[in-house]
Image (cartoon, rainbow, N blue to C red):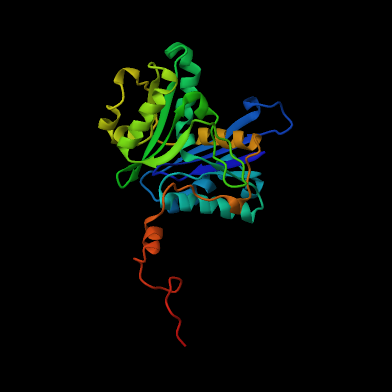
């Protein structure tokens, strides 16, 4: 089986190619990371995504027709970035009649920290919990955020959508919030179960963009993940989530996958408020 997955929810994009033998033993021992690319932060995804897909296929010695299934990060994140990434995935998967796996972009961002903390928990703080926050800038004074206990986040890929199944652990939240409201909810999460020893860790671009915000949480309980590139999604972890979703049966028809914006786009809001001028599809009367 050949899987090609990408995410363009933020300035830095990610692409990964994975391969495994369906008849081999189960588990990660059967999976091979064939290729992994990071898309240039200085370019628009409209310029780099198709180029990146072409390059990773070339490096993997695959043809587009060889892909058995596609995966895509559906957000939350940049409206423009998500439209480019999800539309490209929908188009390719639908044209080739291949299934598509949606992945939460924030779950992919939180994945390496969740894995590291879960494995190191006994050494770091025996019998204690760690709340992980994946946070990216949503502009307009808000933050795209995912938070939950590290062990729960490890098991999260995508929420259910209507009749479409999901893979999401109870107790993990994903919202767009004002910074102070996020801190309030994190403090409440840390106090669950009456534990005063709950630790916390934050990853994502908002971790460094808003340094004063995190000072509102107890510094003595902060865990710094010893890894580079914790500010953006890494292709291998995006691929892990897509593979796990496939194993769990969370596979959808291409046209049933949509961006997960979390909030209404400016244009849609203006349209609902009647602030956009009349046009061919916005109430202009036809003549003749």
Q: Is 32 placed above or below 95 here?
A: above
Q: Return the residue found at the far left.
A: 212
- Near-viewer residue (288 or 73): 288
Q: Is 43 placed above or below 242 here?
A: below
Can you give x and y, in whole percent of width and height, for residue 220 in the image? Answer: 31, 17
Q: Tell me if residue 227 can be seen.
A: no
Q: In this view, does 168 lie to the left or right of 46?
A: right
Q: Is 127 placed above or below 241 here?
A: above
Can you give x and y, in whole percent of width and height, for residue 72 in the image? Answer: 53, 44
Q: Return the residue found at the far front.
A: 194
Q: In this view, does 164 lie to the left or right of 236?
A: right
Q: Tell me if residue 16 can be seen.
A: yes
- Near-viewer residue (253 or 235): 253
Locate the N terminus by quadrant.
Answer: top right
- Image point 47% across, 53% down: which residue? 83
- Near-viewer residue (235 or 218): 218
- Near-viewer residue (155 or 160): 160
- Image point 27% across, 31% down: which residue? 211
- Image point 48% across, 47% down: which residue? 260
The image quarter containing residue 250 is top right
Q: Return the residue found at the far right.
A: 23
Can you give x and y, in whole percent of width and height, for residue 242 in the image? Answer: 58, 37
Can you give x and y, in whole percent of width and height, for residue 88 in the image? Answer: 53, 53
């Amino acid at each position: 089986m050949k899987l090609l997955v990408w995410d363009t929810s933020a300035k830095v994009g990610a692409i990964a190619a994975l391969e495994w033998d369906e008849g081999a033993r189960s588990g990660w021992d059967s999976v091979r990371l064939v290729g992994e690319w990071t898309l240039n932060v200085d370019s628009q995804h409209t310029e780099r995504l198709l180029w990146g897909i072409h390059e990773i296929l070339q490096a993997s010695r695959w043809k587009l027709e060889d892909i058995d299934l596609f995966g895509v990060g559906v957000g939350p994140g940049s409206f423009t970035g998500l439209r480019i990434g999800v539309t490209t995935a929908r188009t390719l998967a639908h044209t080739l009649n291949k299934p598509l796996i949606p992945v939460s972009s924030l779950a992919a961002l939180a994945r390496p920290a969740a894995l590291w903390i879960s494995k190191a928990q006994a050494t770091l703080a025996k019998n204690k919990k760690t709340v992980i926050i994946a946070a990216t800038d949503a502009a307009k004074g808000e933050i795209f955020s995912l938070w939950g206990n590290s062990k729960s986040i490890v098991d999260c890929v995508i929420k259910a959508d209507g009749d479409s199944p999901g893979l999401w652990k109870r107790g993990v939240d994903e919202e767009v919030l004002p910074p102070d409201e996020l801190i309030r909810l994190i403090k409440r999460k840390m106090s669950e179960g009456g534990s005063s020893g709950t630790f916390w860790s934050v990853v994502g671009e908002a971790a460094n963009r808003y340094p004063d915000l995190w000072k509102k949480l107890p510094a003595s309980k902060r865990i710094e993940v010893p890894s580079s590139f914790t500010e953006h999604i890494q292709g291998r972890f995006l691929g892990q989530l897509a593979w796990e979703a496939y194993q769990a049966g969370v596979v959808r028809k291409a046209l049933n996958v949509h961006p997960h914006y979390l909030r209404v786009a400016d244009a849609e809001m203006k349209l609902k408020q009647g602030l956009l001028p009349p046009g061919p599809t916005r109430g202009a009367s036809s003549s003749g």
